[in-house]
Amino acid sequence: MDWLWAAMKESDVFGWETFIDDWFFVFSLAFLAFELLRYLFKKKLSWALMGDTVVNYLTLFMFIFVNLALLAVLYISAYSWASQFAVFDIGINWATIAVCIILADIAYYWEHRFMHKVNLGWATHSVHHSSPYFNISVAYRFGPMDGLFPIFFHMPLILLGFNPFVVFFSEKFVQIFQTALHTEAVKKFPRPIEAIFNTPSHHRVHHASNRKYLDSNYAGIFIIWDRLFGTFVREDEKVVYGLVTPIPEIKTFGDFLAAPFVAFFHGFWRLGKNVLTAKGFKNKWMYMFGTPSWKPKD
Amino acid sequence: MPSPSKAALFTGLLVTAGIFIGGAYAASYMAEPITDAQRDFQYDDYMPSLAPGGNDVAPDTPAVPVYETKAQTNLAEYPVKETTSSQNQAVSSSQTLRQPVAQERAETGLNVTITNTRNAVGKVYVLVFADAAAYKSYDYTKAVGYAELQAGTHNLMASFPELNDGPYAVMILHDEDGNQDLTLDSQGYPAEGYGTSNAKTKYDDLSFAKAAIKPGKTSVKMHYLQ
Ligand SMILES: [Zn+2]
């Protein structure tokens, strides 16, 4: 087990991140092909589904553009600045990376819960939930500011002394794990796995618009956080994917051309409209920082 | 889902904070503190705009290890008294903020104090050479130590914990105009501050053997011709 304790360099960690991220993307494309074939055999493959799949990757491109143009600078400067105030000095090896992944998973839980329960977060995260389908391409459907909120929620790890590259690796690891859960092809795993880990079954519930499934299963890797903090719901009725108030379906070619932009900006469009038209400071504030279910009294 | 009570949310966050601090504390025993050799990503190289005062170091940055971290540069701005008090040692390296392994490390290596910098404009470069030829030809690609400090009128400090052998010759340069070189005037005399270890006056042009110092604490004075 020497490898577990062998000191690693920042560039090693970064190299592993790139390796895993890139090859997982290749795997996900192959898996998508398998899923589409599966839908074909089940006679569930439609132009709307194909169009939605393309839209997912187009939002990914827009997301990457926003990240490179704005958020990467903020991310790196915030982490490198904060790391000088670190409490502990935590070296880099696989053992400390493993601990960091577990902690990053809790950070992800709260970040994800925040994105669902606060309008500002929901404006960007609702993009991810706006697909009426559930396959691995949906995992790559991102909103414009999806890269912003993780910075705040993972900052405690930097301040506690984890190396910024280790934190970055852990964030991405949690995200990649969760990407793999976006599928209908896997029903349920054996019970011990379903008890501890987040699984496709648990995550289908998270993507559901069924009333009993709302606001549940925020987990990244471990479902135990949902069980611990009271947000766990089991999958026992058929899931209807998407938003409670859905965005327009893709029916015509014109819809398809508009769809990437509709999907990418609909959350901030809704947020902006609500905040601007609301009367009084309190209502504007609540439309910004209240929960999405909040409505003005009159 | 019924919406959770405020108390449940508060307890949840408290539990999370506990797991975070406990986890980080445990992790701090799972690995030795990070050494400079492990930090091979310099954020400034990848994010030019992040470097204090913009980054003009990009194309011909010396291909030598950069021992200074951001934190050290900031700490170097603390005024340093010319004593050997323990406080002095404490500010000589950011590593000492992180007890106790690093504290031993700060006692070793080469610690350079730069005195007499006349203003806070631009950067102060510190180069450490271990061989006479590189020193004489001012070949910074063969320097064994390199540090880049924000200029300031107080004493500046640069730590090179790895430099334990010696002899070394230290060269300093106050790059006020930001061209990463010693600017000369029309007559070919230095227009910016410069200095060498062991130099007594601004006219001292020392050979490597004369400038050579042992590892430990050393003080180098910045000189200006004009
Ligand atoms: Zn979600």
Image: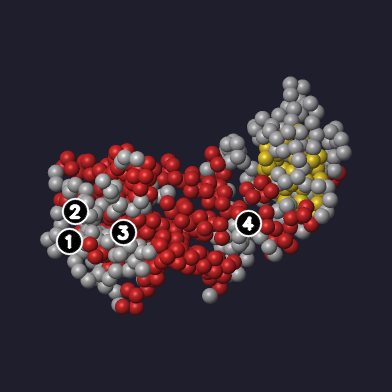
- Residue designated by label 2: A49
Residue lying at the far top in this picture: please name it.
B186
Crowding near pointer 3: few (<14 within 10 Å), some, many (20+)? some
User: Residue B114's spot in the image, x, y percent?
Assistant: 77, 42
Tell me if A200 is positioned left or right of B122 in this view: left
CA distance separating discs 4 and 1: 52 Å
Q: Chain of mark 3?
A: A
User: Residue A49's spot in the image, x, y percent?
Assistant: 19, 53
Disc 1 residue: CB within 8 Å of ligand 1: no
| Element class at badge 3 | helix
Q: Earlier in the sequence, mark 2 or mark 1?
A: 1
Disc 4 residue: CB within 8 Å of ligand 1: no
- Residue designated by label 4: B37
| Element class at badge 2 | helix
Q: Amino acid at mark 1?
A: Tyr
- Residue designated by label 3: A28
Ligand 1 position by quadrant = bottom left
Tell me if B185 is positioned left or right of A19 in this view: right
Q: Which mark is residue A16?
A: none
Q: Which mark is residue A39?
A: 1
Seen in the picture, residue A190 relative to B105 is either above or below; the reply is below
Q: Are marks 4 and 2 on the same chain?
A: no
Crowding near pointer 2: few (<14 within 10 Å), some, many (20+)? many
Quadrant (top left, top right, bottom left, bottom right) of the C terminus of chain B:
top right
Q: Could you say which is closer to the camera, residue B182 or residue B113?
A: B113
Decide if residue A107 is in sight here: yes
| Element class at badge 1 | helix
Quadrant (top left, top right, bottom left, bottom right) of the N terminus of chain B:
bottom left
| Element class at badge 4 | helix
Tell me if A185 is positioned left or right of B126 in this view: left
